[in-house]
Image (spheres, rainbow, N blue to C red):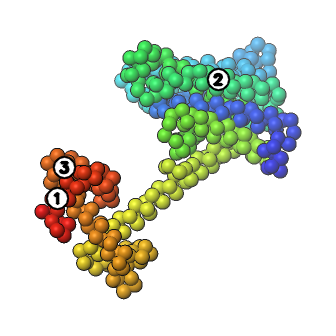
């Protein structure tokens, strides 16, 4: 059944939800990458919580004018206005008071969310407006989603993605060097506000599918997962969008196979699963790659120390060192070095002596700082420089 959901074979409504969630995830991941690179991830939390009173006020206004109150476009518009007020208030508190940005964010999100909960409680006591299920916008719900709702969400995600791609160069420049961007003539506060507007657009667009609380995860988890795979900022943004889109699509498809499961939390858990995969399997920063590099480094250290011990006629006590020497054919089972082991030991001893001579060379001593105990001197010096060092060595490879 899951395969049918992933191949869009579970019906028209499930297909709409999956495609809408994919568009939302693609936009959220891309916007979230720039927010992550700007190191302002917590702002998304304030924006998402600030949408709740606007959602409730929009419902009340639509009911007051004779509507049913559940029109998605109207609810999104009210949420956008409320989120914009919360964003402006956060910026004003940071700029005009002694509050730091994180303190201002904490104050705004808690007050706005508290006001929204109060308004939702009031709405539940009303007899008009189809208020039942309005609280589903907290965590998202796709049950009963109309075609117009899905198209609206997909269009909102596509427009947000297009705007993000249009602004990608100045946003990247500001994220990495705000001072340089200002010198190049970029209006840094204006582009910061543009980025926050994009975050607000993603938050408002995702109210129906993911909810105002869990949309933060869809903005933050994909770029964090993408960061494990690459060091280049444009690639982080691209991978983040792909991870977000895949999370939205797979999460919506998975929830379609079990209608009793909420779509928003499943999308977030799918995103977390991709993050866990990145954490473990990424070739550069993943846990497995770190473990492999550590084991390789450990073996190189043990092998070099064992060879130096053989070169100086000392016994090798470390069990791992003895095993490595025997595995490389450098040491016999009785602890006597092989011919190959003696040659390698002499080579390592000569390399060590050359490093000692380098520390005493008047014109090359600054290169000695690159000695980490494993780097061979042939990788640092030319043949002529090594020949100069060899003239300082005694007949047995010791420093004269």
Q: Residues within 10 Å of mark 2 (few under 14, many from 20)?
A: few
Q: Relative to 11, is 348 above or below? A: below
* Residue 104 visible, this angle: no
Q: Relative to 120, is 4 above or below? A: below
Q: Relative to 189, is 311 above or below? A: below
From the viewer's perspective, is 383 left or right of 125? left
Of marks 1 and 2, the one in the foreground: 1
Kind of element beneath mark 2: helix
Q: Relative to 340, is 38 above or below? A: above
Residue 162: image tag: 2
Kind of element beneath mark 1: loop
Q: As rendered, which of 25 and 84 lies closer to the eye?
A: 25
Q: As rendered, which of 132 and 251 lies closer to the eye?
A: 251
Per the model, the C-alpha gap separating discs 1 and 2 is: 66 Å
Of marks 3 and 2, the one in the foreground: 3
Q: Position of residue 86 (x, y in %)?
A: 54, 22
Residue at image position (52%, 57%) is 288
Of marks 3 and 1, the one in the foreground: 1
Residue at image position (31%, 55%) is 378
Per the model, the C-alpha gap separating discs 3 and 1 is: 16 Å
Mark before the other along the chain sequence, 1 or 2: 2
Residue at image position (78%, 44%) is 6
Q: Residues within 10 Å of mark 1 (few under 14, many from 20)?
A: few
Residue at image position (81%, 43%) is 7
Q: Position of residue 330 (x, y in %)?
A: 38, 76
Q: Quadrant of residue 158?
A: top right
Query: Label 1 belongs to which residue?
Result: 391
């Amino acid at each position: 059944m899951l395969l049918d959901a992933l191949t869009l074979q579970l019906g028209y409504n499930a297909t709409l939800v999956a495609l809408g969630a994919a568009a939302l995830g693609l936009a959220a991941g891309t916007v979230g990458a720039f927010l992550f690179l700007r190191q302002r991830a917590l702002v998304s939390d304030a924006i998402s919580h600030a949408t709740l009173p606007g959602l409730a006020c929009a419902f009340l206004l639509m009911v007051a004018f004779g509507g049913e109150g559940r029109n998605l476009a109207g609810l999104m518009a009210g949420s956008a206005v409320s989120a914009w007020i919360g964003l402006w208030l956060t910026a004003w508190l940071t700029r005009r008071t002694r509050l730091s940005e994180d303190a201002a964010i904490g104050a705004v999100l808690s007050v706005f969310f508290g006001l929204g909960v109060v308004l939702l409680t009031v709405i539940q006591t009303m007899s008009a407006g189809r208020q039942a299920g309005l609280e589903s916008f907290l965590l998202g719900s796709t049950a009963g989603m109309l075609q117009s709702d899905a198209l609206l969400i997909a269009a909102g995600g596509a427009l947000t993605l297009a705007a993000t791609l249009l602004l990608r160069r100045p946003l990247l420049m500001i994220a990495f060097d705000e001072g340089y961007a200002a010198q190049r003539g970029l209006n840094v506060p204006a582009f910061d506000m543009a980025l926050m507007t994009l975050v607000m657009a993603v938050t408002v667009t995702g109210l129906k599918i993911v909810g105002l609380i869990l949309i933060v995860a869809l903005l933050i988890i994909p770029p964090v997962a993408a960061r494990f795979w690459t060091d280049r900022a444009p690639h982080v943004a691209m991978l983040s969008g792909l991870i977000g889109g895949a999370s939205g699509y797979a999460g919506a498809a998975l929830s379609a196979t079990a209608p009793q499961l909420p779509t928003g939390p499943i999308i977030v858990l799918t995103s977390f699963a991709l993050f866990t995969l990145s954490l473990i399997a990424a070739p550069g920063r993943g846990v497995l790659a770190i473990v492999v590099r550590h084991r390789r480094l450990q073996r190189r250290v043990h092998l070099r120390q064992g060879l130096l011990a053989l070169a100086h006629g000392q016994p090798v006590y470390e069990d791992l060192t003895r095993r490595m020497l025997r595995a490389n054919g450098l040491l016999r089972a009785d602890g006597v070095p092989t011919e190959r082991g003696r040659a390698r030991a002499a080579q390592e001893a000569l390399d060590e002596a050359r490093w000692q001579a380098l520390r005493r060379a008047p014109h090359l001593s600054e290169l000695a700082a690159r000695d980490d105990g494993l780097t061979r001197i042939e990788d640092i010096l030319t043949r002529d420089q090594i020949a100069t060092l060899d003239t300082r060595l005694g007949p047995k490879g010791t420093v004269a």
